[in-house]
């Protein structure tokens, strides 16, 4: 049977999420390495993903690391540049599925406050039928509780959910629950999977 809902991760599926690449462009690779060695920026971001305030958390970390304060504040001040560019092929797939009447959800490690701020800049965030955002749920992938929350809310059998994520650990956790999964590497590969599942024709998928 075909999947009854398609679930998209956001970072590195619908838009790029490569903070190191952003800082390489702004600071140069050597200074970026020094910054990331001195300050656990990914740990800071994990706090936001788990529900901490967005600007306040980042600015607090800047205050705690005065030698790097301006660079740390860029995580908030230029956040949209960190989450760029958009992966237009994937966004087109999301929209093609919705045109076909296929329910489309997101399941993302994303701060509740940063998600709301991003809505004005990433228009596709307003196009999901259901949103499962770690900052709202207070639990992040690959914790099994976040997958359970999706199942409880949408009331679909696990084997009727098709989930795309770029991280192997997130895919593995979903597969253990019986979800259909696709480890995202390119929008074209994701398109092929959607065609193989009978959800889109090759023309509809843009391949």
Image: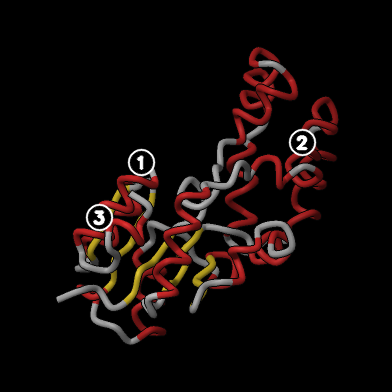
37 is higher (above) or lower (below) than 14? above
In space, the residues marked 1 and 2 are separated at their CA atoms by 29 Å
Q: Nearer the viewer, residue 2 or 107?
A: 2
Q: Secondary structure at mark 2?
A: helix
Crowd rating for badge 1 (residues with CA inside 10 Å; few <14, some 14–19, many 20+): some
Q: Indicate the position of residue 56 as horizontal and vertical percent values.
A: 80, 55
Q: Which residue is identified by label 1? A: 185
Residue at left 59%, top 57%? 49
| Total labels drawn | 3
Residue at left 32%, top 53%? 191
79 is higher (above) or lower (below) than 176? above
Q: Which of the marked residues, 2 or 3, is nearer the chain's N terminus?
A: 2
Q: Secondary structure at mark 1?
A: loop
Mark nearest the camera among 1 and 2 is 1
Q: Which residue is identified by label 3? A: 193
Q: Nearer the viewer, residue 144 or 182?
A: 182
Outermost top residue = 30
Residue at left 74%, top 63%? 120
Q: Secondary structure at mark 3?
A: helix
Q: Indicate the position of residue 129 as horizontal and vertical percent values.
A: 49, 78
Q: Indicate the position of residue 204 as horizontal and vertical percent values.
A: 35, 61
Crowd rating for badge 2 (residues with CA inside 10 Å; few <14, some 14–19, many 20+): many
Q: Nearer the viewer, residue 206 or 116?
A: 206
Mark nearest the camera among 2 and 3 is 3
144 is higher (above) or lower (below) than 33? below
Q: Which residue is identified by label 2? A: 72
Crowd rating for badge 3 (residues with CA inside 10 Å; few <14, some 14–19, many 20+): some
111 is higher (above) or lower (below) than 105? above
Residue at left 35%, top 57%? 205
Q: Are marks 1 and 3 in contact (CB under 8 Å)?
A: no
């Amino acid at each position: 049977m075909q999947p009854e809902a398609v679930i998209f991760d956001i970072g590195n599926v619908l838009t790029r999420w490569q903070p190191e690449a952003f800082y390489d462009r702004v600071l140069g690779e050597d200074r970026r390495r020094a910054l990331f060695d001195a300050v656990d920026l990914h740990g800071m971001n994990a706090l936001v993903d788990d529900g901490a305030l967005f600007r306040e958390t980042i600015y607090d970390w800047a205050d705690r690391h005065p030698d790097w304060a301006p660079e740390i504040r860029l995580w908030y001040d230029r956040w949209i540049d960190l989450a760029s560019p958009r992966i237009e092929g994937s966004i087109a797939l999301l929209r093609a599925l919705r045109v076909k009447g296929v329910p489309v959800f997101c399941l993302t490690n994303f701060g509740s406050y940063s998600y709301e701020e991003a809505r004005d800049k990433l228009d596709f965030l307003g196009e999901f039928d259901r949103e499962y955002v770690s900052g709202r749920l207070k639990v992040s992938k690959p914790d099994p509780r976040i997958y359970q929350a999706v199942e409880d809310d949408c009331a679909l059998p696990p084997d009727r959910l098709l989930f795309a994520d770029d991280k192997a650990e997130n895919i593995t956790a979903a597969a253990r629950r019986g979800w259909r999964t696709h480890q995202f590497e390119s929008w074209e590969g994701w398109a092929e999977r959607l065609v193989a599942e009978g959800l889109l024709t090759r023309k509809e998928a843009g391949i």
